[in-house]
Amino acid sequence: MAILLLHGKEDENIPSRAPGAAAGQLNAAGCDETLDIEPGVGHTISIFYAQKALVFRKTRFAT
């Protein structure tokens, strides 16, 4: 299963260690995880991440 994890490095709501821990657990469970941490972004979805998510969906779940 392909999973995209997106995290803003300046996020004050989610601890900075959480995305890496989640990625490790997903990987150990056999998931095809991709973790991307964007500097300068907080707890929000940036235009960069919206575009990245769209490309991920189109390439990983193409029919």
Image (cartoon, grey):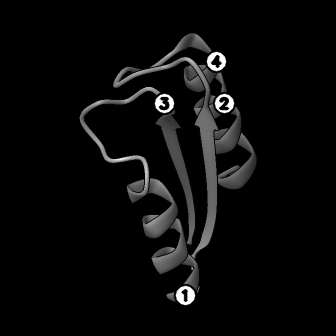
Residue 9 coordinates in the image, percent (x, y): 51, 32
Q: Can you say whether 4 is above or below 28 in the image?
A: above
Q: Which residue is mark 2?
A: 52
Q: Can you say whether 17 is above or below 41 in the image?
A: below
- Per the model, the C-alpha gap separating discs 3 and 4 is 11 Å
- Per the model, the C-alpha gap separating discs 1 and 4 is 28 Å
Q: Quadrant of residue 21?
A: bottom left
Q: Residues within 10 Å of mark 3 (few under 14, many from 20)?
A: many
Query: CB atoms at circles 3 and 2 under 8 Å apart?
Result: no
- Give the SS element for disc 4: helix
Left or right of 41 on screen, residue 12? left
Q: Residue at x 69, y 54 (%)?
A: 60
Q: Nearer the viewer, mark 1 or mark 2?
A: 1
Q: Which residue is mark 4?
A: 48
Q: Residues within 10 Å of mark 4 (few under 14, many from 20)?
A: few
Q: Can you say whether 63 is above or below 7 in the image?
A: below
- Per the model, the C-alpha gap separating discs 1 and 2 is 24 Å
Q: Can you say whether 20 is above or below 61 in the image?
A: below
Q: Which residue is mark 3?
A: 8
Residue 54 coordinates in the image, percent (x, y): 62, 30
Q: Which residue type does callout 1 highlight?
A: Ala
Q: Nearer the viewer, mark 3 or mark 4?
A: 3
Query: CB atoms at circles 1 and 4 under 8 Å apart?
Result: no
Disc sitting over residue 28 in the figure: 1
Quadrant of the rendering where the N terminus is positioned: bottom right
